[in-house]
Amino acid sequence: MKAIEKKQQTVDAIVESFKDAAAVYLLNFEGITVEKDNALRRSLKKNGVKYRAIKNTLLKRVLEKMGVSGLDDALTGATSVMVGFGEDPLLPAREIEAFHKANPDILLAKSLFVDGEIMPGSAVTNLAKIPDRKGMIAQVVTIILGPGSTIAGQLKTLQEKLEENEGSSTEA
């Protein structure tokens, strides 16, 4: 009975730490060295990404409690989980891709649950290309100011030409 209670407490603690998750990334962590794993964990912690290696049976219970379904097929082998939160649910995808640049065959994504949809692990590459909120705002501002600054420049040039023409016509 004690073992069951301890597992339930572990599940509850994990669910609490993953509270408000907007995205769940299931990864295969086989083949990762301790050094690389420690470096990855430091980087993830610095950026606010939750990451844990969890036994599949416990992870299944955690996902059920979180209301995430459809990932049971990915719960085989060595599984770790990254969680993205509401402010930037795609941050783990960018972190995974950054890790893959130096370690292409390690920490492969098995399956993803993003915004209520189940996606294959291969979707990480495309999700990582989507900029964060600040990046999107910068792109929108650039788009808005792009034509506006061109028009403003043209109007200023036209105004200067008109002023030159007025100046030369009043002198004559």
Image: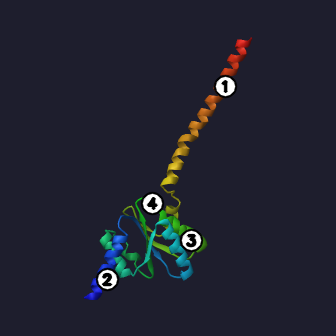
Q: Is residue 46 visible?
A: yes
Q: Which residue is mark 1?
A: 160
SS at mark 2 in the image: helix
Q: Which mark is residue 71?
A: none
Residue visible at 67% across and 25% down in the picture: 160
Nearer the observer: mark 3 or 4; the answer is 4
- Tell me the amino acid under the disc marked 1: Glu
| Residue 7 - label | 2
Q: Earlier in the sequence, mark 4 or mark 1?
A: 4
Mark pair 3, 1: CA separation: 54 Å
Compute the Cα span from label 4 to label 2: 30 Å
Q: Residues within 10 Å of mark 3 (few under 14, many from 20)?
A: some
In three-dimensional space, the C-alpha distance between marks 4 and 1, rounded to whole angstroms, equals 47 Å
Residue 129 percent coordinates (x, y): 53, 60
Of the residues shown, which amino acid type is indicated by label 2? Lys
Residue 128 horizontal/vertical position (percent)? 51, 62
The residue where tag 3 is placed is: 100
Q: Is 104 or 55 nearer to us in this picture? A: 55
